[in-house]
Image (cartoon, coloured by chain):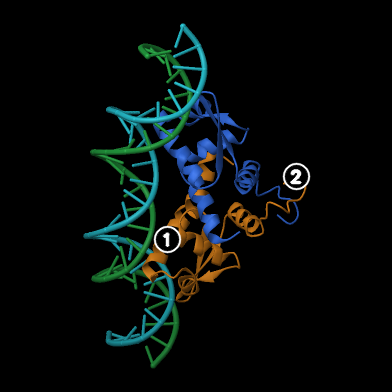
Chain colours: A orange, B blue, C cyan, D green
DNA sequence: AATATATATTTAAGAATTTAAATATGTAAA
DNA sequence: TTTACATATTTAAATTCTTAAATATATATT
């Protein structure tokens, strides 16, 4: 992966609202109405950050009636967060 | 790892100058005079971003005479970049 | 068609960040 | 102890980012 793409990922995750959004999507696809309370931000704020995450290429969306569902579309993002979630520097496997 | 610490790591890596610095340190400890050309930025800019990376807890330093050497001190940072460097969504091992 | 609900967009104000110039500090060598 | 070299700090200007209010759009229901 080249530096440009890495930078895009780190910028996507380097804001509290966006990180909350992504963390909430780690459990799977969610509609905006579920994402909002996970962030503690206003609807317009969440919507704007969702559009930034779309532009950064880390999530995708699908409409179902009135609801819009988002999910993580970038496997690298998913992998990074999964690893940090159970990261413990004292229990690393060989090679890690 | 908690959200605060993740955010610190992503903020550290979410700037082009800082990402260039960290990438150059992936090969091992380097003095400032070696880091500067790897970034394409002025000395004062690199020095300021190095101090930010110190404050964010992802690098450490040691002086040797006139030179100051920096290295990555955060194993999670090291791990993330290592994985992204050889990340290919089509050749993932089982479980990834 | 009118209304309600869910989400998106525009906008404005404030906050935070980035860069580089100027300058300061620490170390070694002459 | 003066000078040169390596790095750090302060400062200022410009840019970027973030939030939320106001408003708009899309869909479903009545």
Closer mark to the observer between disc 1 and disc 2:
2
Host chain of mark 1: A
Quickly name the residue at label 1.
Answer: A49
Please indicate whether residue A70 sits to the left or right of residue B74 in the image. Answer: left
Residue under the point 51% across and 40% down: B19
Residue at 55% in and 38% down: B22
Residue B42 image offset from top left, x and y in percent: 40, 29
Q: Position of residue B67 (x, y in %)?
A: 52, 25
Q: Nearer the viewer, residue A3 or A94?
A: A94
Image x and y of residue A33, in percent:
46, 74
Quadrant housing the N terminus of chain A: top right
Give SS at disc 1.
helix
Helix, strand, or loop for circle 2? loop
Q: Position of residue C9 (x, y in %)?
A: 33, 61
Tell me, yes or no, whether the two marked residues, 1 and 2, touch with CB atoms within 8 Å: no
Instruction: Identify the residue under disc 2.
Output: A95
**Chain that bears disc 2:** A
């Amino acid at each position: 992966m080249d530096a440009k793409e890495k930078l895009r990922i780190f910028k996507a995750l380097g804001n509290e609202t966006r990180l909350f959004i992504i963390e909430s999507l780690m459990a799977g696809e969610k509609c905006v109405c579920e994402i909002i309370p996970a962030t503690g931000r206003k609807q317009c704020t969440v919507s704007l950050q969702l559009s930034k995450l779309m532009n950064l290429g880390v999530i995708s969306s699908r409409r179902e009636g009135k609801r819009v569902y988002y999910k993580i579309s970038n496997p690298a993002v998913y992998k990074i967060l999964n690893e940090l979630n159970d990261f413990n520097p004292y229990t690393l496997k060989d090679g890690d």
